[in-house]
Image (tube, rainbow, N blue to C red):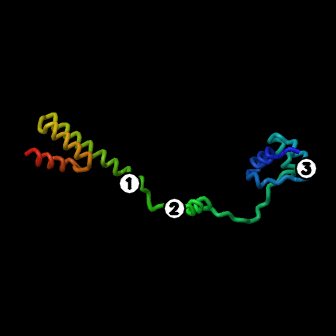
């Protein structure tokens, strides 16, 4: 007699339960063995040859997966960190664009040399100059 894996899988799918929750009637194993389509399985379910295993009243824990993760040492941390990082990055982009535009304008008009331009741009990139006001003060100090 062949294994009844296909029949188990199909009946579990139809009944909406797991494979281990399907029970075959031992008296009708030959009929079940010949059933190869979903329609055949549905007919056998109607006849009572295939049944769902009754629920024994065992309640499963809702947070089973979460508990496994806790056991491994992976716990939730306080708050969302990513959101803060993205906000800081957006703020940096806005400020650096203003600074670079101002520097480019000053270089084109001839108020600063290309050496001063490059030094101020690198300083802004590294976080030494945080906004336009600091840049203006820096340029005033170093142009004298």
Q: Residues within 10 Å of mark 1 (few under 14, many from 20)?
A: few
Residue annotated with mark 2? 75
The answer for how far apart the CA atoms under marks 1 and 3 are is: 64 Å
Please provide percent x and percent y for residue 85.
38, 52
Residue 15 falls left or right of residue 132: right
Identify the residue under disc 1. 84
Residue 122 position, x and y percent, is 23, 43
How far is disc 2 from disc 1 in space, using C-alphas? 20 Å
Q: Earlier in the sequence, mark 1 or mark 3?
A: 3
Between circles 2 and 1, the one closer to the viewer is: 2
Q: Considering the numbered disc 2 on the image, is that residue within a helix, a strand or a loop? A: loop
Q: Are marks 1 and 3 in contact (CB under 8 Å)?
A: no
Residue depicted at x 77% and y 55%: 21
Q: Quadrant of residue 111?
A: top left
Of marks 2 and 3, the one in the foreground: 2
Residue that label 3 marks: 28
| CB within 8 Å, label 2 to label 3 | no
Q: Secondary structure at mark 3?
A: helix
Point 26% across, 48% down: residue: 126
Q: Choose the circle earlier in sequence order: 2 or 1.
A: 2
Which label sits on residue 141?
A: none
Q: What percent of the width, then of the height, locates residue 109?
A: 13, 34
Extreme residue in the left direction: 144
| Residue drawn at (89%, 48%) of the image | 29
């Amino acid at each position: 007699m062949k294994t009844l894996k296909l029949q188990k899988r199909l009946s579990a799918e139809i009944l909406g339960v797991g494979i281990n929750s399907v029970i075959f009637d031992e008296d009708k194993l030959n009929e079940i063995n010949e059933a190869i389509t979903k329609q055949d399985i549905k007919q056998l379910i109607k006849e009572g040859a295939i049944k769902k295993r009754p629920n024994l009243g065992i309640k499963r824990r809702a947070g089973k997966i979460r508990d496994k993760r806790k056991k491994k040492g992976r716990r939730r941390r306080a708050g969302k960190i990513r959101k803060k990082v993205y906000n800081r990055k957006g703020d940096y982009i806005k400020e650096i664009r203003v600074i670079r535009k101002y520097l480019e304008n000053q270089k084109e008009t001839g108020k600063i040399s290309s050496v001063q331009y490059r030094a101020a741009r690198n300083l802004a990139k590294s976080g030494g100059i945080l906004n336009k006001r600091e840049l203006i003060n820096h340029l005033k100090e170093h142009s004298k």
